[in-house]
Amino acid sequence: MSRQHAVTTAELIYQAGQLESKIIQRMLSDIGIRMDHARLLHYVGDIPGTNQANLAEYLNIQPATLTNMIKKLEKQNFIIRRVDPDNPHMKQIFLLPEGESAARKINSIFNQLNNIVASVHLENPDLLQQLINLLEDKYREQN
């Protein structure tokens, strides 16, 4: 006798995220970077000169992990760190020409996926942001 598996909203969101990650990874393979690196380049492209603290918060990663990512992307000539002229203890991050080219490809990939998601015509996309905020609050409560 087979049992019917009840699919929850949380599971559907998880599955959508997993499929999106697989699609992005496949599309990023020609650039030679991973999804977390793509998010970093996308953010720095949108906010040139951002500092590492803001970037770590956006990516939701530990500073040491971010430092390793930055070093790898520097070796690939995607980004450069410069001392913040207003605070010599802080480093700003900028895209190099290779990084700008990669960021354009990444933006195209993200836009393609956004168009797929938008085609579903979610009645109120703000509710997804509200859900994320609630989950972030729950996560912070656990620390």
Image (spheres, grey):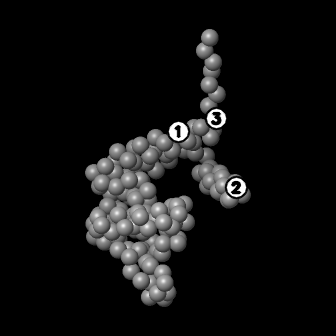
- On the image, numbered disc 1 is attached to which residue? 15
Amino acid type of the residue that numbered disc 2 sits on in the rendered structure: Gln
Sequence-wise, the earlier of marks 1 and 3 is 3
Q: Nearer the viewer, residue 64 or 22?
A: 64
Element at label 1:
helix
- On the image, numbered disc 2 is attached to which residue? 142
Splitting the image into 4 quarters, where does residue 97 fall? bottom left
Vertical side of 139 occupied by 6: above or below: above
Element at label 3:
loop
Q: Quadrant of the N terminus?
A: top right
| Residue at screen point 37% across, 57% down | 106
Q: Which mark, by number, is residue 43?
A: none
Sequence-wise, the earlier of marks 2 and 1 is 1
- On the image, numbered disc 3 is attached to which residue? 8
Vertical side of 41 occupied by 23: above or below: above
Gap in angstroms between the C-alphas marked 1 and 3: 11 Å
Gap in angstroms between the C-alphas marked 2 and 3: 23 Å
Relative horizontal placement of residue 109, taking residue 2 as reference (left or right):
left
Sequence-wise, the earlier of marks 2 and 3 is 3
Q: Residues within 10 Å of mark 3 (few under 14, many from 20)?
A: few
Q: Can I make out residue 89 in this image?
A: yes
